[in-house]
Structures are given as structure tokens and as C-alpha cells.
Image (cartoon, helix red, strand yellow):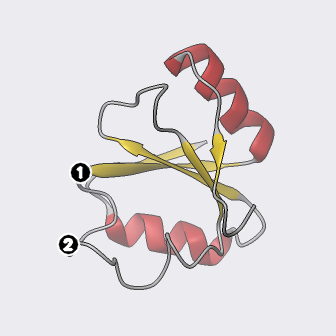
Amino acid sequence: MSPFIDDDAGYLNWLAEHPDDFVVNTPRTPTPKYLRLHRATCVFITGTPARGARWTGDYVKYCGELGELKSWARAEVGGELQSCAHCM
């Protein structure tokens, strides 16, 4: 799993190299109330940010395979992933 905090260039490079993997979008301090799961190709987490100028500022990205992200959410945050209605 790769976390991206204040690292938009690294995040965008990861997306390009892992189109079949997944991304969890969450506040800087992850909370069980918001652990949004996206496919790496989802339009809501790629390209140009819709709000603000950065992808990994107020909200950060945890990227990897689905199983490891689910395990991280349960063990480290104490929550379940909520699937994006658009890409999942």
C-alpha cells in the first residue's frame, strides 16, 4: 500500500503505473466515516482536481490492491470502505 500526503506528483505517477488497482480517498487524519474507495481510473480522483489545486492536500490517498486497502481500513482506521457510486 502506498500513502500519498502532500505528494501530487507521486500520486499521479502511481495512478499511471497501477491502472488496475484502487485508491482510498480520506481526510488527512483517516476516519471511519469517510473512507471512499475508487478504481485507479475513476474520473473523480484523476486528471485535474475539481476543488482546489491539489489531490493530496486536505484529503489524502491510500493506494494499492483491494485486499490490502480493506485490511488497512479495518485494522488501522476501524472502518469499512465505502464504494464510489460512479466507478465501483
- Front-lying residue, 4 or 25: 25
Do the numbered discs 1 and 2 sit on residues whose CB atoms are within 8 Å?
Answer: yes
Direction from residue 41 to residue 32 in the image, left or right: left
Residue 4's mark?
none
The outermost residue toward the front is 85
Quarter in which the C terminus is drawn = bottom right
Q: Residue at x 32, y 58 (%)?
A: 56
Judge whether 47 appears above or below 24 on screen.
below
Q: Position of residue 75 (x, y in %)?
A: 61, 15
Question: Mark 2 packing: few (<14 Cα in 10 Å), some, or many (20+)?
Answer: few
Direction from residue 11 to residue 71 in the image, left or right: right
Q: Residue at x 37, y 49 (%)?
A: 60
Q: Residue at x 25, y 55 (%)?
A: 6
Circle 2: residue type: Gly
Circle 1: residue type: Asp
Secondary element at image label 2: loop
Q: Residue at x 79, y 37 (%)?
A: 67
| Count of numbered marks | 2
Q: CA distance from mark 1 to mark 2?
A: 10 Å
Q: Position of residue 16 (x, y in %)?
A: 60, 78
Secondary element at image label 1: loop
Q: Position of residue 58 (x, y in %)?
A: 23, 51
Q: Position of residue 39 (x, y in %)?
A: 69, 63
Mark earlier in primary sequence (1, 2): 2
Q: Which residue is mark 2?
A: 52
Judge whether 31 appears above or below 1 on screen.
above
Q: Which residue is mark 1?
A: 58
